[in-house]
Image (cartoon, rainbow, N blue to C red):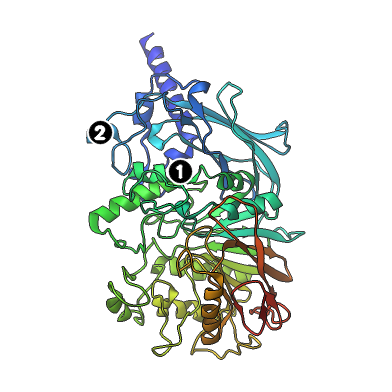
């Protein structure tokens, strides 16, 4: 009798742990860091069977999907307790909330039970996968499922509910990617974003593709959140109202950002493929620190930031077999391969910490390092992976190679002091690493490479030019190795400041165009985003500007359009560059009106 009771108890315990394990938020972001997982044995042992009632929780932060594969996708939501349903949402200021080991306050033993279903039709009657799991304060009440049994390049609809009740989340829509060998029968469209600063303005740029229903997927190149203390002139002060360092801080900051209506709408309608930049941890992060943190403070801060990012974003734990890796790739049929790299957090060498335009801070020290042959912005393990990915993509015959990259890749000089680049925090500070990328493209004759970049809070469109190593004709584009599209910010301020009038930014854009032969269009004024439409014969980029991020609006301006023809490895000159027209900034051999 006792034996059977014991077996029953063990089976019940196993079932409880399994119901937590289906929620991927409890996993570690990195297989190399198992201590960043939330131990399910501890979580399940603490549970008393007491569950939140439907009235005690809300789907406050909407729904999201991401990291789509041909047969699966990650689905996300958060079942947030109402203010009076828990004594406190606070957790110890550690990296992972293991309360009994650090003397911290024990969290609520209550759990929320969540179900999901995903279907091919909007009434959600043709269900192809479903499941249930628990969530607790250990993962900030977040929920992540992997939905399986899906078909390639197919639209699905999904929804969450409190278990065994009719309390439901908003509806979500998502899409799988084509299988690797699939010939895609139409263009694939992407919206590309970076740098969404909540206090600076509304996230109108996220909402406009939703209202137009103009894209298949969203790429986010980083700075999804900012770690600063909020200083908002429009009443958008994020929580907590201080610079963030702890796990609780980063979770609360993500929570504030995900209350923006346009961000929620984008997550609900499109599958996202995101990567972090520096502000997901802290300003100008490199492998051993940031502008204002280093040593053990930086290590714990980064682990807390990564833990919160993993909980709050619809991403996978995919091949994270080395140090807190996020770089990964996606193959969208035979049309293109997408490589999302990490040029900030993974393993980059010392960057500029303080100062501006090469003056102040440690800029003199960095200036002495920029030409070192062993200097890397990516870490040598990630470099080798990128080169291998580019080669494999070319050899398999994919039409295009897209590289999602945080910082501007092309040279950007002011035309003074021997054309010295003005921002060593970009690829201009890692010259040998950039040369190695060009050398690989040249040696292996890899065509149709497109860099997608963010971070600068301005728009830059350039031919990819191996400066001083290969000939280049700026008028025809002959000699280029590909193209770079670098987008402006969703809401973060222009590098010239928040209130610089448009007429004053144009002369500087014109100057930059003149001094940088490879730079074909540049704008410093507008916040916004760009959309890519990718076909086998050509790729088109359209840049959109938001007139005013201080108010929520669907207004936008089509600023400029560019075309890259397959096999040409340069921007098409006529009519998009030479003889073309833009609505802002400066356009080489074209007009701005």
- 63 relative position to 108: left or right: right
> Which residue, given by chain and number where applicable, does mark 2 sit on?
104
Pick the residue in front: 357 or 461: 357
Residue at the right extreme? Answer: 185
Location of mark 1 (residue): 256
The one nearer the camera, 332 or 205, is 205
Q: Identify the residue at image location x=42%, y=38%.
A: 26
Q: Is residue 340 left or right of residue 42?
A: right
In the picture, the quarter occupied by the C terminus is bottom right
Q: Residues within 10 Å of mark 2 (few under 14, many from 20)?
A: some
Q: Position of residue 79 (x, y in %)?
A: 49, 32
Q: Are marks 2 and 1 in contact (CB under 8 Å)?
A: no
Q: Nearer the viewer, mark 2 or mark 1?
A: 1
Q: Quadrant of residue 265?
A: top right
Residue 284 higher or lower than 40, as above or below: below
User: In the structure shown, which secondary structural element does the residue marked by tag 2 occupy?
Assistant: loop
On the rendered structure, is 390 left or right of 29? right
Q: How far across and down, in percent of the image, does residue 208 sit?
A: 64, 53
Q: Residue at x 42, y 28 (%)?
A: 83
* Residue 329, quarter of picture: bottom right
């Amino acid at each position: 009798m006792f034996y059977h009771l014991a077996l029953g108890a063990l089976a019940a315990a196993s079932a409880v742990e399994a119901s937590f394990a289906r929620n991927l938020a409890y996993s570690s972001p990195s297989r190399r860091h198992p201590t960043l997982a939330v131990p399910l044995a501890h979580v399940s042992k603490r549970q008393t069977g007491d569950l939140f009632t439907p009235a005690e929780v809300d789907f406050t932060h909407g729904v999201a999907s991401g990291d789509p594969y041909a047969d699966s996708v990650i689905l996300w939501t958060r079942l947030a307790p109402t203010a009076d349903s828990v004594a406190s949402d606070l957790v110890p200021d550690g990296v992972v909330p293991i309360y009994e080991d650090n003397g911290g306050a024990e969290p609520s033993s209550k759990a929320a039970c969540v179900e999901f279903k995903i279907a091919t039709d909007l009434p959600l009657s043709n269900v192809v996968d479903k499941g249930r799991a628990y969530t607790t304060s250990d993962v900030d009440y977040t929920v992540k499922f992997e939905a399986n049994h899906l078909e390639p390049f197919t639209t699905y609809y999904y929804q969450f509910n409190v278990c065994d009740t009719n309390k439901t989340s908003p509806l979500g829509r998502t899409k799988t990617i084509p299988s690797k060998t699939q010939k895609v029968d139409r263009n694939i469209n992407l919206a590309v974003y970076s740098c969404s600063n909540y206090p600076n303005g509304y996230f109108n740029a996220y909402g406009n593709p939703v209202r137009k229903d103009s894209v298949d997927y969203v790429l986010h190149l980083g700075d999804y959140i900012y770690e600063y203390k909020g200083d908002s002139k429009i009443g958008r002060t994020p929580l907590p109202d201080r610079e963030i360092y702890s796990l609780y801080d980063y979770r609360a900051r993500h929570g504030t950002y995900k209350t923006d209506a346009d961000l929620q709408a984008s997550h609900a309608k499109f599958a996202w493929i995101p990567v972090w930049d520096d502000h997901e941890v802290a300003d100008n992060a490199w492998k051993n620190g940031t502008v204002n943190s280093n040593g053990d403070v930086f290590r714990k801060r980064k682990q807390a930031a990564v833990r919160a990012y993993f909980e709050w974003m619809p991403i996978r734990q995919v091949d994270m077999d080395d140090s807190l890796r996020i770089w990964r790739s996606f193959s969208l049929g035979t049309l293109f391969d997408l490589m999302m790299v990490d040029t900030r957090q993974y393993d980059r060498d010392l960057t500029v910490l303080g100062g501006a335009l090469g003056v102040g801070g440690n800029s003199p020290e960095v200036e002495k390092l920029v030409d070192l042959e062993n200097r890397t912005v990516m870490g040598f393990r990630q470099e080798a992976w990128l080169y291998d990915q580019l080669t494999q993509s070319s050899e398999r015959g994919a039409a295009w190679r897209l590289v999602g990259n945080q910082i501007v890749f092309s040279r950007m000089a002011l035309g003074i002091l021997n054309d010295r680049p003005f921002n060593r925090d970009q690829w201009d500070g890692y010259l040998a690493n950039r040369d190695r990328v060009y050398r690989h493209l040249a040696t292996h004759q890899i065509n149709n490479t497109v860099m997608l970049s963010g971070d600068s809070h301005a728009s830059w469109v350039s031919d990819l030019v191996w400066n001083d190593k290969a000939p280049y004709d700026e008028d025809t584009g002959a000699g280029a190795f590909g193209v770079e599209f670098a987008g402006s910010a969703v809401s973060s301020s222009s590098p010239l400041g928040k209130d610089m009038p448009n007429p004053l930014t144009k002369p500087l854009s014109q100057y930059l165009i003149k001094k940088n032969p490879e730079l074909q269009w540049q704008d410093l004024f507008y916040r916004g985003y760009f959309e890519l439409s990718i076909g086998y014969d050509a790729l088109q980029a359209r840049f959109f500007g938001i007139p005013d991020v201080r108010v929520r609006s669907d207004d936008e301006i089509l600023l400029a359009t560019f075309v890259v023809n397959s096999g040409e490895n340069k921007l098409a000159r006529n009519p998009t560059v030479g003889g073309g027209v833009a609505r802002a900034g400066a356009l080489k051999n074209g007009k701005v009106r």
